[in-house]
Amino acid sequence: MSLSPGRYGRVVWLMVGVCLGPRAVTAQDSLDSLAARLVGMTAVSGYEQAVIDTMVGLLPGAVRDRAGNAVLEIGSGEPHVLVVCPIDEAGFVVGGIRPDGYLTLRRAGPGAGPRAEERLQGQRVTVFGRKGAVPGVVGVRSIHLTRGRDAAPAFTLDDAYVDVGAASANEVAALGIAVLNPVARTKAPHRYGADLLAGPGAARRAACAALLSAARHRQGSRSGRTTIAFAVEQRFTRRGLLTLLHQRGPFVRTVLVDGDPAPTRWDPGFGAVDSWLVPVRYPGTPVETISLTDVRALEQRLLSLIGGAP
């Protein structure tokens, strides 16, 4: 049974000082802090440029290529090695704007995994519109109207109606929201225990933090040339990786620094492919958890690869 917005109670927002996103990362941030802040940033596949801007700003000499990757080349000659961390994540876009002010959603790229859509029900989301980030919430079925009925079917994306506090399509437009604006669950990375960090996509973003930190703190370069990159659209079309190959390859070796296993099929131009992962608990869930000790170990391993330890 598909639910209409009338079955949801419209949310009244009384929000003072709500943080719409992480503060800007500075070059003085420690690896632990950098990992937490990157986990808190949003880069829906195809809409990664805000995070790419952060990478370029933090990594002197890095440039943005035609695909939107952040790329730094160090050293010269051969052999040529690629060290790359994808930054994109599964997410949604605004699929439609209803006359009553509710937003409908569509996937951006592949899905986020089994039951991901069910976990979206009743959750806070952020819509990234023309005027900046706008908080919203995905409505839930009315307990009063459904009590005593047969069990409702599983919640799907077709049941998701996003309330951003607008009562009409004109009010939505005034917030700077339009069709195809990216939408993601509002993130709140959580530190707990001695060194644990939890948040959506924590392993992938922490791996990128390790690579970024290693590139910033390198003391030289290995023999030959190394291309360090933060790639876009890995989950969607692999356009970022393929652009790196066509513009800068071939490579004798590729190290994929990621929270996900490497694809099984690679173009020969990538050379020998390794996947360096951050060990992860509860992968693919909103509480995906990694150990910052493992992130520091990955940073040291990367430093040994690209040019010395601090």
Image (spheres, grey):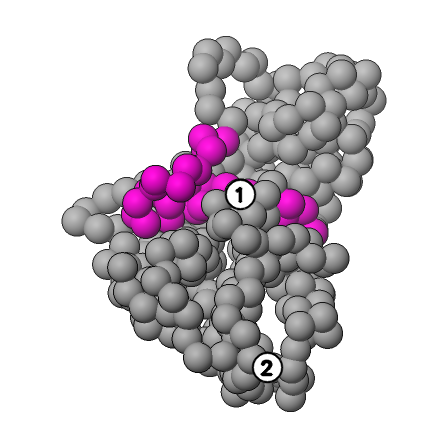
Left or right: 242 with respect to 70? right
Q: Crowding at label 1, few (<14), some or many (≥20) Cα neighbours within 10 Å? A: some
Q: Position of residue 47 (x, y in %)?
A: 67, 46
Closer to the camera in the image, 147 or 35: 35
> Disc 2 marks which amino acid?
Phe
Magenta residue check for 296: no
State which tag comes first along the sequence, 1 or 2: 1
Q: Dot 2 corresponds to which residue? A: 251
Q: Main secondary structure of the magenta part?
A: loop
Judge whether residue 286 can be spotted in this image: no
Q: Secondary structure at mark 2?
A: loop
Magenta extent = 21-49
Q: Position of residue 30 (x, y in %)?
A: 30, 45
Q: Residue at x 49, y 14 (%)?
A: 15
Q: Residue at x 28, y 65 (%)?
A: 309
Q: Residue at x 59, y 59 (%)?
A: 71
Q: Secondary structure at mark 1?
A: helix
Q: Position of residue 155 (x, y in %)?
A: 60, 46
Q: Position of residue 14 (x, y in %)?
A: 50, 11
Q: Crowding at label 2, few (<14), some or many (≥20) Cα neighbours within 10 Å? A: many
Q: Residue at x 73, y 23 (%)?
A: 176
Q: CA distance from mark 1 to mark 2?
A: 26 Å
> Disc 1 marks which amino acid?
Gly
Closer to the camera in the image, 188 or 152: 188
Seen in the picture, residue 259 relative to 191 is either above or below; the reply is below
